[in-house]
C-alpha cells in the first residue's frame, strides 16, 4: 500500500510502505473509511518539532475491522470502529479514573494517513458503532477520534457549566469544536477569539455569541471589557504557544478555570503571576477514549454536526495539498478519502 511520510520541513510524500500486520495478539487491523490532517501535524511539517528521520503520519481514524489478534475479545472483523490518537488498555488504574491518554501501556498512534492501520490494544482503544454508518456521517464520526474529543476535554477541564461565560483561544478545528462542546455543556456566553472570517462564521454556527479579533494584551482587555472587568468563568486554550497560554490565563476570572489542550511549544509559566492569578489549570493530551461513546452517540442521533470543520476534501494520494492548504490557512481541516 501507499502511505504518508514526512521527510522534513514541508516535505510530505505519499509513497510505498508495507501493509500493516498483526504484531501483538491484542492488535487489530482496520481499513480506513476516512482520515485527515491534524493541526498538530503542522508543527513537524513546519519544522517546529523535530523528527527522527522519515516519519509516517496521521493519528485520526475510523474504519472497518479486517483482522484481529488472538487475544482480542470485544472487537470483531466487519465492525465499524473509531479509536483515539492514544491507545489504552482501558483497565489500568489511570484508565479507570478516565485518563486513558496516560494509560500505563499507552502508545501514540501514527501511520493513519494510509488505507490500512494497525491499532494496538484494540479492545481498550476501539469503540464500535451499531452497524456501518452512512457516508455522510463519516466526517463527523472522524472528529470524535481527536479534534472533537480534544475540544470536549478542553471544555470539561475548564469546568464549563450551564450558564457559564466561556472564552475560546484558538480558531482551528479544536478551538471551533471547543465552542461546540461548550454550547453542548450549557454555556450561556461563548466568546471566540478569531481573526479569520470563515472561522468566525463557523464559530457562530457552533454556538459562539461574541467574536474578539484582538490578541495579546489588547485581547485580554477586550475580554475584560465584555465581562465587566471580571474575566471569563472558563477559558479553553487550544493553540499551545506562550502567547495563547498567557492570554488564556489573563482572560480568566479569579477562581476560574483554564482547560489547555494545545500541544505546548515554548510555553513557560511565571510562578508568581500564576500564584496571584487564582486560576485553576488543567489539561494535557485529551482522554478521548473517555468521551468516545457519548460523542459517537451525539453524532449518530443528529445532535451535533462537528464534521463541518472539514472544509477541504481530497483523495488520500493528494495528502500533500491538504498539508499545504492548512499550513497556508486556506483550509481549517482537510479530510482524506482512501
Image: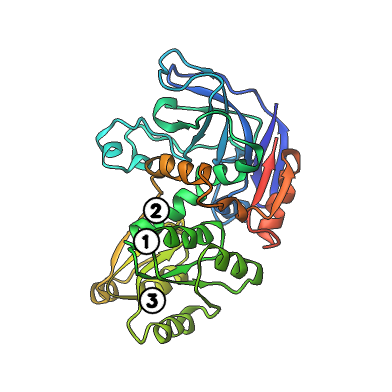
- Upstream in sequence: badge 3 or badge 2: 2
Instruction: Note whether residue 54 is visible.
Output: no
Q: Could you say whether the residue bearing mark 2 is in a helix, strand or loop?
A: helix
Residue denoted by label 1: 259
- Alpha carbons under labels 3 and 2: distance apart: 19 Å
Image coords of residue 328 (percent x, y): 69, 62
Label annotation for residue 251: 3
Residue denoted by label 2: 153
Image coords of residue 4 (percent x, y): 67, 38
Give 98 or 283, whichever is nearer the viewer. Answer: 98
- Crowd class of label 1 (few under 14; some 14 to 19; many from 20; radius 10 Å): many
| Picture residue at 38% right of the left edge, 42% below the top | 101
Asked if labels 2 and 1 touch by Cβ distance under 8 angstroms, the answer is yes
- Alpha carbons under labels 1 and 3: distance apart: 12 Å
Image coords of residue 42 (percent x, y): 60, 54
| Picture residue at 42% right of the left edge, 61% below the top | 182
- Upstream in sequence: badge 1 or badge 2: 2
Amino acid at each position: 500500500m501507499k502511505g504518508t511520510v514526512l521527510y522534513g520541513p514541508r516535505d510530505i510524500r505519499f509513497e510505498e510502505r508495507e501493509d500493516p500486520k498483526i504484531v501483538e495478539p491484542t492488535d487489530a487491523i482496520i481499513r480506513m473509511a476516512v482520515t485527515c490532517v491534524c493541526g498538530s501535524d503542522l508543527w513537524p511539517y513546519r519544522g517546529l518539532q523535530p523528527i527522527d528521520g522519515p516519519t509516517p503520519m496521521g493519528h485520526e481514524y475510523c474504519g472497518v475491522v479486517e483482522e484481529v489478534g488472538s487475544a482480542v475479545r470485544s472487537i470483531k472483523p466487519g465492525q465499524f470502529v473509531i479509536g483515539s490518537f492514544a491507545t489504552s488498555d482501558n483497565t489500568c488504574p489511570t484508565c479507570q479514573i478516565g485518563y486513558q491518554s496516560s494509560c500505563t501501556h499507552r502508545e501514540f498512534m501514527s501511520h493513519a494517513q494510509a488505507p490500512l492501520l494497525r491499532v494496538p490494544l484494540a479492545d481498550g482503544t476501539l469503540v464500535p458503532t451499531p452497524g456501518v454508518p452512512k457516508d455522510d456521517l463519516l466526517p463527523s464520526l472522524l472528529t470524535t477520534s481527536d479534534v472533537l474529543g480534544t475540544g470536549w476535554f478542553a471544555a470539561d477541564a475548564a469546568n464549563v457549566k450551564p450558564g457559564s461565560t466561556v472564552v475560546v483561544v484558538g480558531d482551528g478545528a479544536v478551538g471551533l469544536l471547543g465552542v461546540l462542546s461548550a454550547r453542548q455543556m450549557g454555556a450561556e456566553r461563548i466568546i471566540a477569539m478569531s481573526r479569520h472570517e470563515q472561522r468566525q462564521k463557523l464559530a457562530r454556527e457552533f454556538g459562539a455569541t461574541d467574536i474578539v479579533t484582538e490578541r495579546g494584551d489588547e485581547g485580554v482587555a477586550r475580554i475584560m471589557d465584555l465581562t465587566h472587568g471580571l474575566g471569563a468563568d472558563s477559558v479553553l486554550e487550544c493553540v499551545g504557544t506562550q502567547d495563547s497560554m498567557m492570554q488564556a490565563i489573563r482572560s480568566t476570572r479569579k477562581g476560574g478555570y483554564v482547560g489547555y489542550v494545545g500541544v505546548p511549544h515554548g510555553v513557560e509559566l511565571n510562578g508568581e503571576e500564576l500564584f496571584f492569578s487564582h486560576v485553576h489549570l488543567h489539561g494535557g493530551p485529551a482522554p478521548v477514549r473517555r468521551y468516545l461513546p457519548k460523542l459517537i452517540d451525539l453524532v449518530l442521533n443528529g445532535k451535533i454536526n462537528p464534521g463541518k470543520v472539514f472544509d477541504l476534501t481530497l483523495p488520500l494520494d493528494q495528502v500533500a495539498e491538504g498539508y499545504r492548504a492548512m499550513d497556508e490557512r486556506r483550509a481549517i481541516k482537510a479530510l482524506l478519502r482512501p
